[in-house]
Image: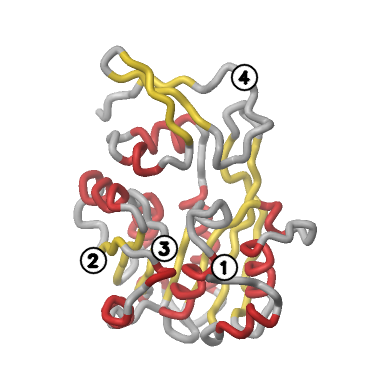
Amino acid sequence: MQRQHIIQFPKKKAHNLRQDEVYFHIQEKGTQRKIRFHDYDKIYQVQGLYEQIFYDRLKCISPGKVTSILQSAINQSEDTFTELRVLDLGAGNGMMGEALKKHGVSRLIGVDIIPEARDAALRDRPGLYDAYYIEDFTKLNDDTGEELASWQCNCMVTVAALGFGDIPPKAFIVAFNLIESKGWVAFNIKETFFDTRDESGFSKMIREIVFSEYMDVYIIERYRHRLSIEGEPLYYFAIAGRKKADIPAEFLESKGIVVA
């Protein structure tokens, strides 16, 4: 069995902290270390720590939920889940990829921006991905772009990585445009990103894409993503749909959204 790490959440309530600012302490060899929830490089270096915090203790269900709504969307078409060639954007240590593999996909390509994510995926889930790239999609060069396109992905997924600066709007669009037309898209976002009072570039981008001619939305479902460290539910939307066409840069520029 994977050994349990000694972790402690802060005594003070974290209501004044943004979701990406929340932190915990871990005891290691007699010393205590503070790590923020979004310090993924540090978390991935400790085997089993990510799963213990987010899945065992905070009851995250997002990989299973997004996989489920993707399955439901595909069931509304003549396509089959097992024919999916998936680009897993922000793949991390492979939690979403593992959920997809349980249902059977023909190809699974991981992408993340930090090397520690790939290291953790290869360590904890060897053989899960057909390939795993460490790339900044806001600076993707032509050669790598062509190599990624050669995988002929017809589905893009991204889970728990949107809207906190983890995946910028431009990276999302580059990944979206890499998959084939009529390909599938599934992701989740914090519920407040659908609030029109949220004027952040990412929030506006998601609203414009979801309700644009470039994507057909099949399912939008509100669900409990996980618990906060106080035990309160954090709600997200899971979204699944079908790509109709590439998103041109001028589309978002015309909406006043900067994607650089």
The image shows residue 254, relative to residue 138, as above or below, that is below
Q: Which of marks 2 and 1 is nearer the N terminus?
A: 2
Say which quadrant the N terminus sits in: top left
> What is the C-alpha distance between the residues marked 4 and 3?
34 Å
Q: Looking at the rendered structure, which numbered label has been put on residue 89?
A: 3
**Camera-side residue of 18 and 107:** 18
Q: Earlier in the sequence, mark 4 or mark 2?
A: 4
Kind of residue sitting beneath label 2:
Asp
> What is the C-alpha distance between the residues marked 4 and 2?
43 Å
Kind of residue sitting beneath label 1:
Ala
Kind of residue sitting beneath label 4:
Lys
> What is the C-alpha distance between the residues marked 3 and 2?
14 Å
Q: Which of marks 3 and 2 is nearer the N terminus?
A: 3
- The residue tagged 1 is 240
- The residue tagged 2 is 130
Q: Which of marks 3 and 1 is nearer the N terminus?
A: 3
Q: Looking at the rendered structure, which numbered label has been put on residue 56?
A: none
Q: Determine the secondary structure under disc 2.
A: loop
In contact (CB < 8 Å): disc 3 and disc 2: no
- The residue tagged 4 is 12
**Camera-side residue of 5 and 13:** 13
The image shows residue 152, relative to residue 238, as above or below, that is below
